Image (cartoon, rainbow, N blue to C red):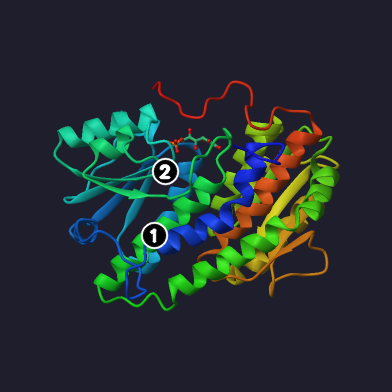
């Protein structure tokens, strides 16, 4: 039930800190260490390459998950859109492990891939919010998101839950390989939960930003570099699906290779700046679009922020920034839809789970 909330989406955005804490609890053993079914860790270690298969928001979570698994556990990862994989199958490695990411566990495009790879005898792990869902039943292993039912069509808490579970999978795999991820993930995820709370309490400021940048525009661009690029893709998807503003995410350096032609006087460009190594270069990209008339909205992380920034998110570990930088983007999209009188929870033409190929 949505209780006092006007929309499920807003309620589900607000539930994210509690979901983080629930996940930390669910994946902790009696000794207070993160733990995952040893069969799953065996499957990870026994594979020479992980193939993540997903659609939509779950695909965007997979793009970030690749960074976690490669940087922490040092296993190569490919991320594929499920609807493309069937007829565009890449050359597979000798010992692939397939990881399906799906909030609903019912996405037909993903299931088609699962059926296909099971026929070939490969192992599959499903990361899903729904125990007993088709993708969970038909895979060899399941990791649950513990996000609680997600009712709004636009996925919010399932995305951040997917990221947290992928980080835990990466960390536990890393430890089993005697690799030191260099930070205490339980502690860092606790900080993420606290930061999410701060962001959920900043709705008024974000509503104001949404009104300023998004209430009249036809289109909007999201830019970022590295991990921020993937979050930008998700921010753009959130905005377009519920507000019907044409929104696209780009790698900061890629804009000038074509898309910059679309920048007009007042075009909103939302830039993420959460990574120290690319802070100056993403700001350089912002200058390029501003010179063509863009209206820049920079969302940066504390410590990297500058005077011109529109919003500053609290500091968390640099690998985990997607878990919190997405929150203001979710809230921005929510208010853009609201200000445009759109049906926030049930956007036109969309279904919560897409059970046709
Ligand atoms: C976006 C959204 C969709 C889903 C996609 C995959 O907000 O809800 O893009 O992410 O249809 O759904 P699942 O994760 O259930 O496989």
Q: Residues within 10 Å of mark 2 (few under 14, many from 20)?
A: many
Rendered residue at 56%/65% (across/down): 192
**Residue located 20% across and 56% down the image:** 43
**Residue at the disc numbered 1:** 26
Would residue 318 be visible to someone looking at this image?
no
Q: Helix or strand or loop: what does disc 1 sit on? A: helix
Residue 214, position in %: x, y? Answer: 79, 40
Instruction: Please state if 329 lies on the left or on the right of 104 as rendered.
Output: right
Residue that numbered label 2 is attached to: 129
Secondary structure of the residue carrying numbered label 2: loop
Q: From the viewer's perspective, is 341 left or right of 124?
A: right
* Residue 241 location, quadrant: top right
Q: Nearer the viewer, mark 1 or mark 2?
A: 1
Residue at the spot 58% in from the left edge and 58% down from the top edge: 17
Q: Quadrant of residue 244?
A: top right
Q: Residue furthest left?
A: 121
In front of the other: 20 or 155: 20
């Amino acid at each position: 039930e949505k209780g006092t909330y006007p929309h499920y989406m807003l309620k589900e955005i607000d539930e994210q800190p509690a979901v983080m804490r629930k996940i930390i609890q669910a994946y902790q053993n009696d000794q207070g260490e993160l733990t995952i079914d040893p069969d799953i860790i065996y499957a990870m270690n026994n594979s020479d390459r992980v193939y993540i298969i997903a659609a939509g928001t779950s695909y965007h979570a997979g793009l970030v998950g690749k960074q976690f698994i490669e940087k922490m556990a040092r296993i190569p990862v490919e991320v594929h859109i499920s609807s493309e994989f069937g007829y565009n199958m890449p050359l597979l490695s000798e010992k692939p492990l397939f990881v399906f990411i799906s909030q609903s566990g019912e996405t037909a495009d993903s299931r088609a891939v699962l059926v296909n790879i099971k026929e070939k005898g490969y192992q599959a792990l499903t990361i899903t919010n729904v125990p007993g869902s088709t993708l969970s039943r038909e895979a060899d292993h399941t990791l649950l998101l513990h996000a609680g039912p997600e009712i709004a069509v636009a996925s919010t808490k399932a995305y951040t839950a997917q990221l947290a579970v992928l980080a835990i999978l990466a960390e536990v795999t890393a430890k089993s390989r005697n690799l030191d991820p260099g930070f205490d993930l339980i502690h860092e995820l606790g900080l993420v939960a606290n930061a999410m709370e701060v962001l959920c309490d900043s709705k008024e400021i974000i509503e104001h930003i949404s009104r300023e940048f998004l209430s009249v525009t036809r289109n909007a661009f999201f830019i970022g570099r590295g991990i921020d690029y993937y979050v930008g893709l998700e921010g753009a998807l959130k905005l377009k699906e519920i507000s019907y503003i044409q929104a696209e995410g780009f790698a900061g350096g890629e804009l000038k290779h074509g898309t910059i032609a679309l920048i007009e006087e007042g075009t909103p460009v939302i830039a993420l700046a959460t990574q120290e190594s690319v802070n100056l270069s993403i700001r350089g990209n912002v200058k390029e679009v501003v010179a063509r008339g863009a209206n820049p909205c920079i969302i940066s992380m504390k410590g990297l922020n500058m005077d011109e920034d529109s919003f500053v998110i609290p500091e968390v570990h640099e690998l985990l920034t997607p878990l919190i930088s997405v929150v203001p983007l979710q809230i921005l999209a929510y208010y853009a839809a609201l200000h445009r009188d759109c049906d926030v929870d049930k956007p036109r033409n969309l279904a919560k789970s897409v059970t046709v190929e």
